Image: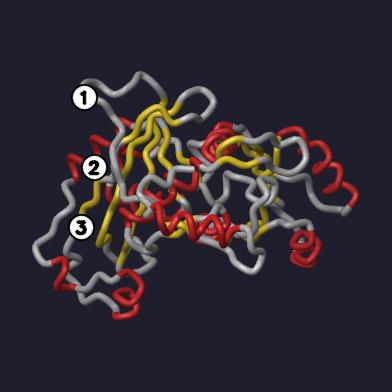
Amino acid sequence: MNIEHLNPENEDVARHLETDPNYRLLRAVPRPYSNVPKGAPPYARCVALIDLETTGLDPANDRIMELAIMLVWVGENGEVLNHIAPRVWQEDPQAEIDPRITWITGLANHHLVGRKIPDEEVLAMLDRADLLVAHHAAFEVSWLERRYPQIKGAAWACSMKDVDWLRAGMDGRAQQWLLAQEGWHSNAHRAGDDVWSLFWLLQQRRRGWGKDPERSHLERLLEGADRTTVLVQATRAPIGKKDVLKARQYRWNAMHRVWEKELEESLVPHEEAWFYTEGLPAPTLRTVTAQERHR
């Protein structure tokens, strides 16, 4: 555990309190720093951690206010070889920011006057990465592919969904809560802070349940991103079967108007047999990789 940034005297008190079951301690995540030596970055897999702050939830009508990207180079087993501190840019949305967004992010119109995200610089960083990562990737994908159509088809991973947090011994999936369970806290709802705290979270190591050995959450994330799965869609399912499908953890895709669930390839024959016994039409199957998973 890296605690070099913490006050040694206070840390002595903290260690004492940790022995008392009536207390739970959270240490502050250190300030961002870079770990790339001068010269070319290592020849290794490059992962871009990404976060956005926006004026709303609709990419067609709302605007990006803040964007952060952090490049991390990882080895074969997910160990961090090098990284650079997050790059953070802001942009004037040229529209009135809802006060509720300001309450959440701390960003108001007067903070952003004249600011502009440098698209060429952003695209250069995104193009450098072999894998794009966000904690709610479907959100970032919908915004960034609209602004930068050049990255359509890029591989994405979602640290919220591509890690089996329950199997990893964690409760819930919200980033700040996961970080707290590892004993850390940071500022939330600012792009740079969220990217850096995600990097810190993914470096934490713990043993999971069952046969999941002690390893970093980053290794778990990369394993989840690299797997090939199958999207099972209950096409032509009668409306009267919706409760049966919900009970089997199918989710309604409003855009395509179909109940669907993502499964490991080995489970598909069993699922097809379940469709048959339930009197459902044979499902539609589609292979899913990191290039399709969060779109």
* Foreground pick, 290 / 9: 9
Mark 1 Cα-neighbour bin, 10 Å: few <14, some 14–19, many ≥20: few
Mark count: 3
Q: Which mark is residue 183?
A: none
x and y percent of residue 67 in the render? 28, 53
In the figure, residue 16 lies in which quadrant? bottom right
Mark 3 Cα-neighbour bin, 10 Å: few <14, some 14–19, many ≥20: many
Residue picked out by circle 2: 122
Q: Residue furthest top?
A: 43
Q: Secondary structure at mark 3?
A: strand
Residue type, label 3? Gln
x and y percent of residue 293 in the render? 54, 43
Q: Earlier in the sequence, mark 3 or mark 1?
A: 1
- Pointer 2 with pointer 3, Cβ within 8 A: no
Residue picked out by circle 1: 38
Q: CA distance from mark 2 to mark 3?
A: 12 Å
Look at the picture and state if 243 lies above or below 88.
below
In the figure, residue 74 lies in which quadrant? top left
Residue type, label 1? Lys
Q: CA distance from mark 3 to mark 1?
A: 27 Å
Residue picked out by circle 3: 90
x and y percent of residue 11 in the render? 45, 55
Q: Earlier in the sequence, mark 2 or mark 3?
A: 3
Mark 2 Cα-neighbour bin, 10 Å: few <14, some 14–19, many ≥20: some
Residue 215 appears anywhere in the view: yes
Give the residue displayed 17% in from the left and 40% down from the top. Answer: 120
* Foreground pick, 129 / 275: 129
Give the residue displayed 21% in from the left and 77% down from the top. Answer: 96
For marks 1 and 2, give the one nearer the viewer.
Answer: 1
In the figure, residue 104 lies in which quadrant? bottom left
